[in-house]
Image (tube, rainbow, N blue to C red):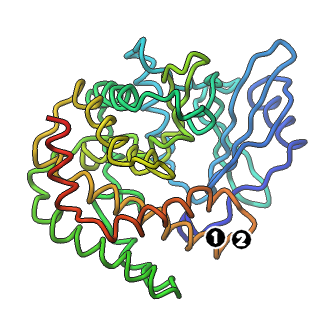
């Protein structure tokens, strides 16, 4: 069974208090956090120390969990003044990952420091610099470029260099219009991206730089990033493409948002013309994956409202782009950035 079709953990807050004390030696108070396939908690002590506890889906591979541990350690060993990430808190016995048994299932869990600030989604968008967001993601690339882990070369549905999941799940839509829109973007991807596969460089990317995972200081400076659960070895250009895919949702001027993010990114990390031309097709295919995953998982877990958090805006954008000339968008983005 896949982690995407398996039920996430369902621990109660009273259980978490005992688990954290037994494994980490901390007396804490607990609040629930939004979760997708895992279960997350915000923890705090009487002395105002703050943490986040992640209890992994029992079907998550230990190699993937180790991949996340390794990248967080990599950031600590390559400290950047521009990027803050959570720091791993070891167990009492000195391990990066704790383990517990419940109902004959073993769960892995990790405790990390809490990155203070606001999620980008909660910031007044009128004060957001999308150029700065792009340059932040470019700085992220510079740190990840020196990170190596064979476990990043994996197949996951969220990887836009492999749309097998998207093609296989197309039949879940009963709405013929939605199905035709996704089919349209799949065809464009196969026409515009697949033939250029060899000229689109690959590297390890965070792969989920959306506004839930970007952390902003009180002065609106973007400085932190969380949730490395979708890390993968993929197109390097997919990193800004994913960020743009979510940044344009609900915006009146999506081209300007996309262009500013790309300009900021390219001020730090060069993108070839092939990469820049691919951006708009990758943006659209990422949102196709997003709405397909939301449909698929909400059918399995109808009570998890978090799964549909960006679904309506994503469909609105895809419907809008379905009527646009993507070749024109592609060429105009190159000109805008250059």
Q: Which residue is mark 2?
A: 302
Q: Position of residue 219 (x, y in %)?
A: 57, 16
| Proximity of marks 1 and 2: CB atoms separated by less than 8 Å | yes
Q: Secondary structure at mark 1?
A: helix
Q: Nearer the viewer, residue 50 or 175?
A: 175
Q: Give the quadrant of the C terminus.
A: top left
- At x 82%, y 29%, the residue is 21
Q: CA distance from mark 1 to mark 2?
A: 5 Å
Q: Nearer the viewer, residue 105 or 323?
A: 323
Q: Quadrant of residue 247?
A: top left
Asked if one can make out residue 89 in the rendered structure from this viewpoint, the answer is no
In the image, residue 65 lies at what x, y percent?
Answer: 51, 44
Q: Is residue 131 above or below residue 200?
A: above
Task: Give the left or right position of residue 8, taking residue 280 as reference.
Answer: right
> From the viewer's perspective, is 26 left or right of 156?
right
Which residue corresponds to the image point at 17% horizontal and 61% vertical from the top-left? 327
């Amino acid at each position: 069974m896949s982690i995407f079709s398996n039920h996430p953990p369902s621990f109660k807050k009273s259980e978490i208090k005992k688990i954290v004390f037994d494994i980490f030696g901390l007396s804490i108070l607990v609040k629930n956090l939004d979760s997708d396939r895992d279960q997350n908690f915000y923890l705090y002590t009487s002395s105002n120390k703050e943490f986040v506890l992640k209890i992994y889906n029992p079907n998550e591979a230990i190699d993937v969990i180790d991949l996340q541990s390794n990248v967080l350690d990599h950031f600590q060993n390559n400290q950047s003044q521009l990027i803050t990430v959570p720091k791993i808190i070891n167990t009492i016995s000195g391990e990066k990952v704790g383990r517990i048994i419940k109902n004959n299932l073993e769960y892995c869990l990790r405790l990390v420091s809490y990155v203070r600030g606001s999620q980008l989604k909660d910031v007044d968008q009128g004060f957001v610099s999308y150029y700065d967001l792009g340059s932040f993601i470019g700085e992220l690339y510079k740190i990840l470029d020196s990170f190596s882990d064979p476990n990043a070369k994996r197949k996951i549905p969220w990887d836009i260099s492999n749309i097998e999941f998207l093609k296989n799940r197309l039949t879940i839509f009963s709405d013929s219009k939605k199905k035709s829109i996704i089919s349209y973007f799949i065809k464009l991807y196969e026409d515009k991206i697949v033939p250029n596969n060899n000229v689109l460089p690959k590297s390890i990317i965070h792969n989920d730089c959306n506004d839930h995972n970007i952390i902003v200081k009180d002065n609106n400076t973007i400085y932190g990033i969380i949730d490395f659960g979708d890390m993968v070895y993929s197109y390097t250009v997919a990193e800004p493409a994913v960020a743009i895919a979510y940044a344009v949702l609900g915006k009146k001027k999506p081209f300007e948002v996309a262009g500013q993010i790309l300009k900021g990114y390219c001020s730090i990390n060069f993108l070839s013309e092939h990469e820049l031309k691919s951006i708009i097709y990758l943006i659209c295919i990422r949102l196709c994956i997003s709405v397909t995953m939301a449909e698929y998982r909400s059918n399995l877990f109808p009570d998890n409202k978090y799964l549909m958090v960006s679904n309506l805006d994503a469909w609105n954008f895809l419907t809008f782009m379905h009527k646009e000339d993507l070749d024109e968008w592609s060429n105009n983005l190159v000109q805008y950035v250059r």
